[in-house]
Amino acid sequence: MDSKEISAFQQQLQDWYGINQRELPWRHTTDPYRIWVSEVMLQQTQVNTVIPYYYRFIERFPEVAGLARARSQAVLKSWEGLGYYARARNLHKAAAVVDSRYGGRVPDDWQDFTALPGVGPYIGAAVLSIAYSHPYAVVDGNVKRVLARVFEDPTPVNGSAGHGAFRRLADSLLDQSRPGIYNQALMEVGALVCKPANPRCADCPINTFCLGNRHGSLDRYPQRNKRKPVPEIRIAAGVIRRNGRVLITRRKPEGLLGGLWEFPGGKIHEGESAETACRREIKEEVGLNIVVDAHLTQVRHAYTHFKIVLEVFLCDHVDGNVRLNGPVDHRWIKIEDIDQYPVPRANLKFIPKLRVKKPEVFNE
């Protein structure tokens, strides 16, 4: 595109956005902290899922200082069910840096802001352009898809060179005078019109610029490198009962699901029954001898790079004191108090069954 075409591209995009943008809570503020929270939550998560979490999180932590000084367990509990918990841990750490080093003001300098934990190029560009009107182009999945179709760009969007290539292209199209509006408009077209399947080309404000639309090649873009099949892992976990209470353990603060509480268990070995794995894992992880009473349920859950099939058993404590090997803390709690602890979404899927069966399960 020449400069005249780029100017028309920008104008048509932003005119459309002014009329068709969704009503989203973070679009009614210029507060960089609130925009930052929304962008962190929106990573890997759909907008409709994020909205209620955003409201609750901002109500609980309305400013940087409050988040910075909150207990990690309170932050994780507010994030519970949203997934990708490293986002919450990094946001908490970053808030502490902003509070102590920048007096609670989110820095508007690229180097300072992107040096914060969990703030990469995407969040850096989104927050600095939307909150501070700094000229940084946002490149997310929606943007890559739109640009790949408009320019019939064969660069695989999930390849190692993909992000740099699409960033250079996005930079060349950015409206330097209204970068925040432009970025949101381009992402909104990707979310509402230029969808992965069945794009609504007749409603697209930039269809006259789109080579994919002109040549009927939309189904070939964006291009992707083939991914390996997602592995499936079988896991056994036990709800261990003792004197009307159950045992929960807390994971190490770093890594997958770091800092969350869960019912003890682990991977089922090849050729091993789920029930045997449950007894073995509990012995290895918390040092207890238990007897398996009944199979409660099976839970399927998907993470980014793998899936799990979780077999959950009701168990009774036989003997032994808790000796942790892996977890960093434990509690014997009443099941009605489980809401006080942040737990993984896979656990949230079966906890309601424990509440329904409470008199039967706990012999009350």
Image (cartoon, rainbow, N blue to C red):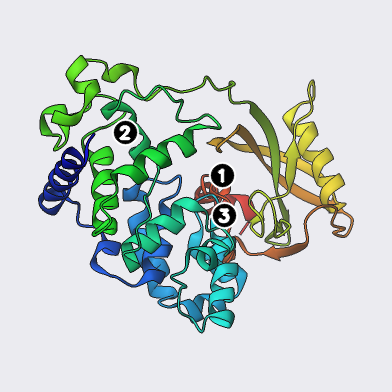
Q: Position of residue 323 (x, y in %)?
A: 87, 58
Q: Amino acid at mark 2?
A: Leu
Q: Is residue 5 left or right of residue 109?
A: left
Quadrant location of the N terminus in the rendered image: top left
Q: Amino acid at mark 3?
A: Tyr
Q: Nearer the viewer, mark 1 or mark 2?
A: 2
Q: Nearer the viewer, mark 3 or mark 2?
A: 2
For the residue carrying disc 3, how many other residues have a C-alpha within 10 Å: few (<14), some (14-19), or many (20+)? Answer: many
Q: Is residue 329 visible?
A: yes
Task: Identify the residue shown where x is 40% and y is 43%.
Answer: 140
Task: Identify the residue shown where x is 43% and y is 74%.
Answer: 60
Gap between marks 1 and 3, in whole Å?
A: 13 Å
Residue occupied by mark 2: 147
Of mark 1 and mark 2, the one earlier in the sequence is 2
Q: Position of residue 230 (x, y in %)?
A: 59, 25
Q: Position of residue 288 (x, y in %)?
A: 85, 51
Residue occupied by mark 3: 85
SS at circle 1: helix
Quadrant location of the C terminus in the rendered image: bottom right
Q: Amino acid at mark 1?
A: Ala
For the residue carrying disc 1, how many other residues have a C-alpha within 10 Å: few (<14), some (14-19), or many (20+)? Answer: some
SS at circle 2: helix
Above or below residue 210? Residue 137 is below
Q: Position of residue 7 (x, y in %)?
A: 17, 45
Of mark 3 and mark 2, the one earlier in the sequence is 3
Task: Identify the residue shown where x is 74% and y is 35%.
Answer: 267
Task: Identify the residue shown where x is 19% and y is 22%.
Answer: 213
Residue occupied by mark 1: 346
